[in-house]
Amino acid sequence: MRLNEFSYCVSQSLVLVPYEAYHVTRYHQWMLQPDILEATASEPLSLEEEFEMQRSWRNSDDKLTFIVLHRDTLESAMGSKVPASNKESASLPWQRQPAAELAAMIGDVNSFLIPNIRAVEEDNQDNEEVVREGREFELEVMIAEPAYRGRGLGREAVQCLIAYLSEALGAQPGQLLAKIGDDNLASQRLFTGPGLRFQLADRQPVFRQATYRCPSEAAPPTPPGWAGVLTCSRLPAAATGCGLSA
Ligand SMILES: CC(C)(COP(=O)(O)OP(=O)(O)OC[C@H]1O[C@@H](n2cnc3c(N)ncnc32)[C@H](O)[C@@H]1OP(=O)(O)O)[C@@H](O)C(=O)NCCC(=O)NCCS
């Protein structure tokens, strides 16, 4: 999505950056792993198709993607701190460093924007009919690097994505949802556990998955150490094309 082309987000443990061509080769390696393909309900793509996907997501009106970087690893690889306020980045705009980002890449978060839905559904909690209108935001997360799983980073990444959607697009808690496979216990616990508290809304047994929604009365989550939506400078042209693959 063009919207986040020059945006990044900083929290206590993470830095979220827009998905660039130089991330694709690593991302593609993740997306060849059978367990990740199954958990994300994805089809394997060739490297060329993955580059095409990155370009199409960048230009898309409805798909927003951030690559999740581990903040300490990034800052060690850069040899400097990431500016963590717009005041800091205004005086010295953050010059992104592709090699440091590749060293710190651990996953991605993304949101699919569903425009102008109008649906009447049965609420599983109270057996009442609920009319849903307006935009919705389907959320997805992946912490692909095994060494970084189980450390609360997946949940922090989703909290950052929600904070971004709220600040940049005015997303409301009741507009947020996640579709999770029936066997994906880690993702179910991530979304329904502390700090997010999504609730089971609708089962789709045919697809062996269910939809979980954030209650509309919930307060938007605040990621630990959230520094707001920040602005980075334009990348060198060589880094934005598909010529730089690693
Ligand atoms: C799902 C995924 C993002 C979780 O990321 P993570 O960083 O390991 O998760 P967190 O450390 O933030 O933990 C979140 C919750 O999940 C639980 N959890 C994590 N891994 C788990 C596992 N393998 N089995 C059961 N629960 C697990 C944690 O205990 C925690 O719950 P709690 O607060 O009740 O203790 C990660 O496993 C992943 O990327 N899987 C492959 C892709 C995928 O499934 N994406 C989701 C598609 S809907």
Image: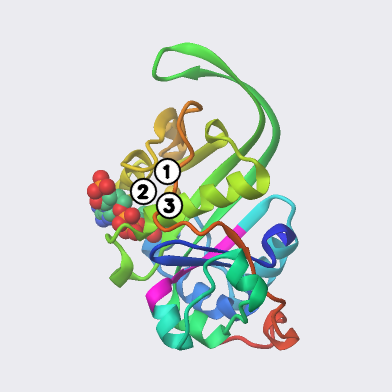
Which portion, as a residue range, is magenta?
A: 65-72
Q: Is residue 113 above or below residue 124?
A: below
131, 220: nearer the viewer: 220
Does ligand 1 reach within 8 Å of label 1's beta carbon? yes
Please report whichever mark, 1 or 3, sits nearer to the chain's N-terminal start: 1
Label 2, label 3: how far apart the Cα atoms are: 18 Å
Label 1, label 2: how far apart the Cα atoms are: 7 Å
Residue 53: percent from the left, percent from the top? 66, 66
Does ligand 1 reach within 8 Å of label 3's beta carbon? no
Front tag of 1 and 3: 3
* Residue under numbered circle 1: 180
User: Quick check: is 133 in the magenta stretch?
Assistant: no
The image quarter containing residue 7 is: bottom right
* Residue under numbered circle 3: 223
Q: Residue at x 31, y 63 (%)?
A: 149
Does ligand 1 reach within 8 Å of label 2's beta carbon? yes
Q: Is residue 130 above or below residue 185?
A: above
